[in-house]
Amino acid sequence: MFFSSSGPPLKRLFLGLILMAGSLVPQHRAAAETVIVLDPGHGGHESGAVWGGVREKHLNLNIARRVESILRSRGYTTVMTRRKDVFISLDYRARVANQFRRSVLVSIHCNSDGRQRGRGIETYYAGSSGKRLARQIHRRLDSRTSTPNRGLKPCRFSVLRRTDCPAALVECGFLSSKSERRLLCSPAYQQRVALAIAEGIAIGIR
């Protein structure tokens, strides 16, 4: 649908602003009512993977902040389990999501392989409720990144198992791989990953 550009300038401007505002608001009622809980993995004394002086906990938080910014700009309601470099328990992460009537949880991580052979993205879920969410996120990560697709996998990770809502855990790449570590440290690549995750969440909660 479009409006003719032949009308008065003020009318065209008004209609344009309406279209812009509408494009930022979730178009499905379920999506509009869903609280998206973003969970940057690790934090505080728990650094996660550490390779080449790069700590996973910092990358997880950077990517999660970018995902939140994208989602909020499109009208979604978001909550972060942590907003700075602090330790929080797995139980607390799940409880944050469980306090809402309608929510999803997406835990954001980077991977590691002691043999330094692993590369690529993978996404985990526990139970059927999280599978659709995880699948949509993984599809968009696969289309927006150039790293190997390691697949969508069921797993009984605690943070997934303890949530009452649909939940997914994303491994955005391997810090133990020099090439992927370089990518993950790039703001431009972090934004690309964040956009893929945000798009997948938006479709997964409809």
Image (cartoon, rainbow, N blue to C red):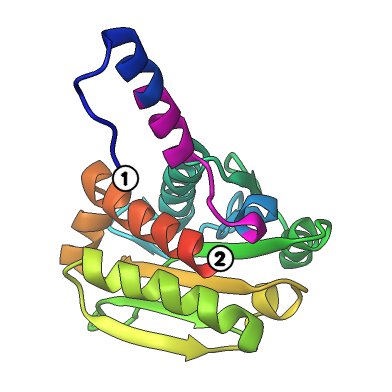
Q: Is residue 163 left or right of residue 70?
A: right
* Image x and y of residue 191, in percent: 30, 47
Quarter of the image holding residue 40? bottom right
Question: Can residue 187 be seen from the camera position used here?
Answer: yes
Q: Which residue shows up at 47% across the image and 65% down it?
A: 203
Residue 23 or 199: which is nearer the viewer? 23
C-alpha distance separating marks 2 and 1: 22 Å
Residue 206's tag is: 2
* Image x and y of residue 182, in percent: 19, 56
Q: Which residue shows up at 15% across the image and 64% down it?
A: 179
Quarter of the image holding residue 41? bottom right
Residue 37 or 23: which is nearer the viewer? 23
Give, as a three-letter code, the residue at label 1. Met
Residue at the disc numbered 1: 1
Q: Nearer the viewer, mark 2 or mark 1?
A: 1
| Magenta-highlighted residues | 16-30
Q: Earlier in the sequence, mark 2 or mark 1?
A: 1
Quarter of the image holding residue 5? top left
Give, as a three-letter code, the residue at label 2. Arg
